[in-house]
Image (cartoon, helix red, strand yellow):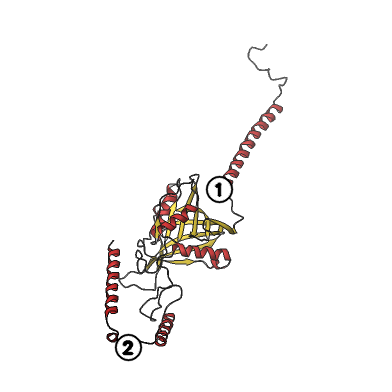
Amino acid sequence: MKNKKKRQERARADEDALAELRARPASALGDVASDSEDETVNDAHAKRRRASVVPGTGYVPEGKAKSVDASLVNKNEKTLVLTSRGATSRYRHLMLDLLTLVPNAKKDAKLDTKNERNVVVEAADLRGCSSAMFFECRKKQDCYMWLAKTPSGPSIKFHVENVHTMAELKMTGNHLKFSRPSLHFAPAFDETAHRRLIKEALIQTFATPYRHFKSKPFYDHQMCFYWEDNRVWFRNYQVVHPAGKEVKTQGLTLSETGPRLCLHPIKIFAGAFGGAVLFEDETFVSPNAQRAESKKRDVTKYQQKVQKKQARKAHKHMNQLRGGELDDLFRDGDD
């Protein structure tokens, strides 16, 4: 509310200043530059900005300039985070951990399993979000994570594996809440087209927009994404500075904070939560199929156990000891 009032006061002050300038006579404003002079000034200013700003980041290298051009960065980039009804405590805590790592994230209510996934697009539009992170839980044991760019797409469906939350790990790392993360991607993400698309989706979801009002103006942790065994492995580390009051760029170390998770990409769709299939992992086996296969193995084990018992009984029956002539020789009562 305070920020809103401040913005309203600034807008009123700008309107008053503009009204005063319009009320003044033209002679009081001094010489008016020609169109050609305006174009020359604008071109020179644009050249200086291009020379001082790193394209696509909005950051100025040290010694280049004192101001920052944030025109290439979308300050209104927001991510909607929600889960389906029936999620277990482990996946709910994972969602809360990711909410603390992404300052520009907005949490929404649980989505009923009977509703279609397209409802997430409408919810993101109502909340003013351009991306969505949806945790779809099935049978209270399987979790699928959707990363979608709303409303036009694309979207990626992952199977979430090997989940370990912050409370479960209890690591020594401890960075500030809502501080800006530095994203690190393994070189393997640039080898194929679908990996580059996954990398871009992760950047759009986890990167903090420049000068977001909830973010801190510095980096103190690093999110690392690795590609191994056709999966995305996520780790979060705190950047630990050497002991002392001065902040140094040398001698930095990393201390893991958590959470840990593994994302197995299943399909990439052209639209948001649907559309043409751009990529599909044919080696993926659903958890239902894995459980069915394991039950079949258990059934065969039981059948083998029963067959062994029957074979043992038949063997004993066929190889019984026959009575001999001297079996009753020393029995009591015999003559």
Which image quarter holds the C terminus?
A: top right
- Quarter-of-image position of residue 292: top right
Element at label 1: helix
The kind of residue tagged 2 is Asp
259 up-or-down from 115: above or below: below
Nearer to us in this view, 139 or 67: 67
Residue 265: where, in percent of width, then height?
A: 55, 57
305 up-or-down from 47: above or below: above
Which image quarter holds the N terminus?
A: bottom left
Nearer to us in this view, 153 or 59: 153
Q: Residue at x 59, y 53 (%)?
A: 284
Q: Residue at x 61, y 38 (%)?
A: 299
Quickly name the residue at label 1.
287
Closer to viewer: mark 2 or mark 1: 2
- The single residue placed furthest to the right in the displayed view is 325
Q: CA distance from mark 2 to mark 1?
A: 75 Å
Residue 32: where, in percent of width, then height?
A: 34, 86
The kind of residue tagged 1 is Pro
- The local crowd at label 1, few if under 14, some if 14 to 19, many if 20 or more residues have their Cα within 10 Å, is few
- Quarter-of-image position of residue 283: bottom right
Element at label 2: loop
Nearer to us in this view, 190 or 311: 190
Q: Are marks 2 and 1 in contact (CB under 8 Å)?
A: no
The answer to whether residue 171 is seen in the rendering is no
Quickly name the residue at label 2.
31
The answer to whether residue 222 is seen in the rendering is yes
Nearer to us in this view, 129 or 160: 129
Mark found first going from the N terminus, 2 or 1? 2
304 up-or-down from 161: above or below: above
- Quarter-of-image position of residue 311: top right
Residue 207: where, in percent of width, then height?
A: 43, 65
Horizontally, is 263 left or right of 128 in the view? right
